[in-house]
Image (tube, rainbow, N blue to C red):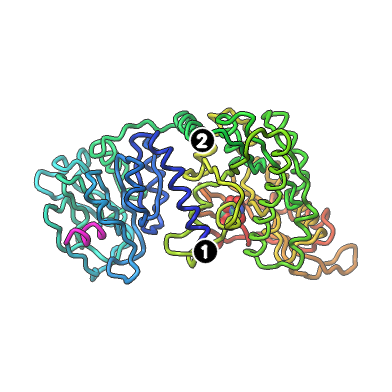
Amino acid sequence: MAESAARRVAEREHEQGGRMKAELGGVVVLDFGGQYTQLIARRIREQQVFSAILPCNTPMEEIQKLEPAGIVLSGGPSSVYDADAPKCDPQVLELGIPVLGICYGMQWVAHTLGGRVEKAERREYGRAHLRVDCQGGPDSSELFAGVPEALRIWNSHGDHVRGLPIGFRATGHTANAIASVEDPKRRIYATQFHVEVKHTEHGTELLRNFLFRVCKAEPKWSGAAFIEETTQAIRAKVGNKWAICGLSGGVDSTVAAVLVHRAMGNRLTNIFVNTGLLRKNEFEQTLEMLRERLKLHVIGVDASDRFLVLLKGVTDPEEKRRRIGREFIAVFAEEAQKLQGGEAHGEIGYLVQGTLYPDVIESVSVKGPSATIKTHHNVGGLPAQMPFALIEPLRDLFKDEVRRIGKDLGLPPEILVKHPFPGPGLAVRLLGEVTHTHLVILQDADAIVVEEIRRAGLYEKVWQAFAVLLPVRSVGVMGDGRTYGLTVAVRVVESDDAMTADWVKLPEEVLERISTRIVNEVRGVTRVVYDISSKPPSTIEWE
Ligand code: XMP
C-alpha cells in the first residue's frame, strides 16, 4: 500500500507539472503534515491563483520544473527537533522564489537558516493578539502593508522562534512570542500564526499581499481557465492513445468524464459498472441520464454477481475496499481489451478517475501509512500493478470547486447536487458480510431516507443522507407477534468538503416519517437509530 501510494504521489507530481507550467503564476504548497494545508491551497485558489500541494520532501528538480511564482511551507504537528521531523530540501530557500512559512513552516525556516527555535514555556493554542511592531509599521513590510497594527490571530504551536537568522527582522509579536519574521531581500516571509484560518483577522489580506505584492502572481485561475488548461494538459499527456473512464454517475467522475471528453473526443469510452452495490435502481437510471442527457458514450457492465462472490465471507472494511478496487480494475481491463479488438483504433493507455483532494489526503499521508484513515478505493485501494496510467484531472480540488467546474461545463443541476457516494458503495454501509438479502434491505431503507429528505426540501441543503445496515438484531413487536430483526442507522451530515462534518439536527417529523416507513416497509428491520456523531472523531461512512 505504502509503495503504491508513493508511486501515485510521484505520478501526481508529473501530472501537475504539465498543468502548473501552463498555469503560469501558480503557487506550490509544501506539506509538512499540517491539518490546515488543504485550506491554504484553497484560500490561494479563492484568490484565483492556482495552487497545488506537494509532500515537503518533493525533490527540488520537481518543484523547479513547475516554475512556481511562490512557495508556501505549511504547518505541521512536529517539532524541528524531533528525530523524524519532516524537512524540505534547504535549497528551497535559495531558489530566489518567494517563500511564506506558516507555523512549523516558520520554525523550519528559522532553524534551517541558523536561527533559534525553542520549546515555549506557554504554548499558544487558539486566539492571540498580534502587534505589528517593526520599525516603519505595517506598511514597511510587503506582507503587512495595509493592515492594522493590532490584529486578532489564530495560533496552534508548542515551539517558537527565539533567535532570528542573519538578515531577518521580526515584524510582529504576541505577548508570548515572535509572531512573524521576514528577510525582504531574499523574499522570505514567515508567520507563527495561521493566516489561512478565518479566525485570523485580515488573514486574507496577508495572503493576498504575499501572492500579489511579493510573488507578483496574477489572478488568472478560474473555472474557465482550469477547463482550458486541463484539457490542453490532457491532450499533451495522452498523445494519440485512447482512454477509458470509470464512470459512476456521481459529480466527480461525471465532471472528469466530460472534461476528458472535451480533450479527447470519442477516443474516450466511459465504463459504468453495476457492482450490485449501488443505490436502488441507480444503475438503470444513471445509465439513461449519462447517455440521453449528457450524450456520453457509456458501456454499462453488469458485474453484480462477480462482486458478490468476491465479497463472500469478508467483513474487514479495508479488505472489502481492496477486493472491490481490484475487481473494478479487472472489469475495466476486460472492457478495454474488448474495445481494443473493436472500436478503439489505438492503444488504450489511460484510466480516467474523478479522484478529489480529500480522497487523496485521507488515503496518502506524508507521515506514512500509519496515519492513513481509509484507503478510498480510487486512491490507495488500487492494485500496485495496473495496465493503465491514471488521469485524475480533479485531484487537487475540493467538491465545491468541482461542482463549480461542472456548472461551467454545463452539467445539469441534478448531477451537480447529487450526494457523494463511496466507490465501494453499499459494501461499506453494510457492516459485516455483504449478502444479497442484506443489500436489498439496505437499498430499500436507503431509498426511503433519500425520498423523505427530498420531500422535506433538505436534499440540497445537506452533504449526505443515507442508511447503514447494522448486523445487530433486536426484538420488536408487530401485529401482536414478536419480531427479531436488524437495525438501520440513519446518517445525515452537513459538511463543506467531507474533511469535517456535523450531524444534521433533522426536524422531529422527518425523523419520525423515516423511522415509521422503514420499519413498516422494509421487511427484516425492527429498529431505526439516528447517528449523532460528528467527524472527527467519527467518519462520515461507518466503514
Ligand atoms: P469518510 O467516511 O472518510 O468519508 O468520512 C468522506 C467522504 O468520502 C466518501 N468516501 C469514499 N469515497 N471511496 C470513495 O470514492 C471510498 O472508499 C470512500 N469512503 C468514503 C464518503 O462518502 C464521504 O463523502
Q: Is residue 428 left or right of residue 9?
A: right
The x and y percentages for residue 188 are 21, 48
Q: Quadrant of ligand 1?
A: bottom right
Mark 1 or 2, which is nearer the eye?
2
Neighbours of disc 2 within 10 Å: few (<14), some (14-19), many (20+): many
Residue 382 % position (x, y): 60, 55
Left/right of residue 217 with respect to residue 430 in the rendered view: left
Q: Quadrant of the C terminus?
A: bottom right
Between 134 and 220, the one nearer to me in the picture: 220
Q: Residue furthest right?
A: 480
Magenta-colored stretch includes residue 112 = yes
Mark 2 = which residue?
Answer: 234
Q: Quadrant of residue 312?
A: bottom right
Let me know if residue 55 appears in the view.
Answer: yes
Is residue 247 placed above or below 475 in the rendered structure? Answer: above
Circle 1: residue type: Pro
Question: What secondary structure is the stretch in magenta mostly built from?
Answer: helix
Q: Is mark 2 within 8 Å of ligand 1?
A: no
x then y, percent, for residue 480: 90, 66
- Mark yes or no: residue 503 visible: no
Q: Which residue is mark 1?
A: 537
Q: Secondary structure at mark 2?
A: helix
Q: Residue at x 46, y 60 (%)?
A: 365
Magenta span of residues = 107-114
Viewed as shown, does residue 233 lie left or right of 259?
left
Dot 1 crowding, Cα within 10 Å, few <14, some 14–19, many 20+ = few
Q: Position of residue 389 (x, y in %)?
A: 56, 46
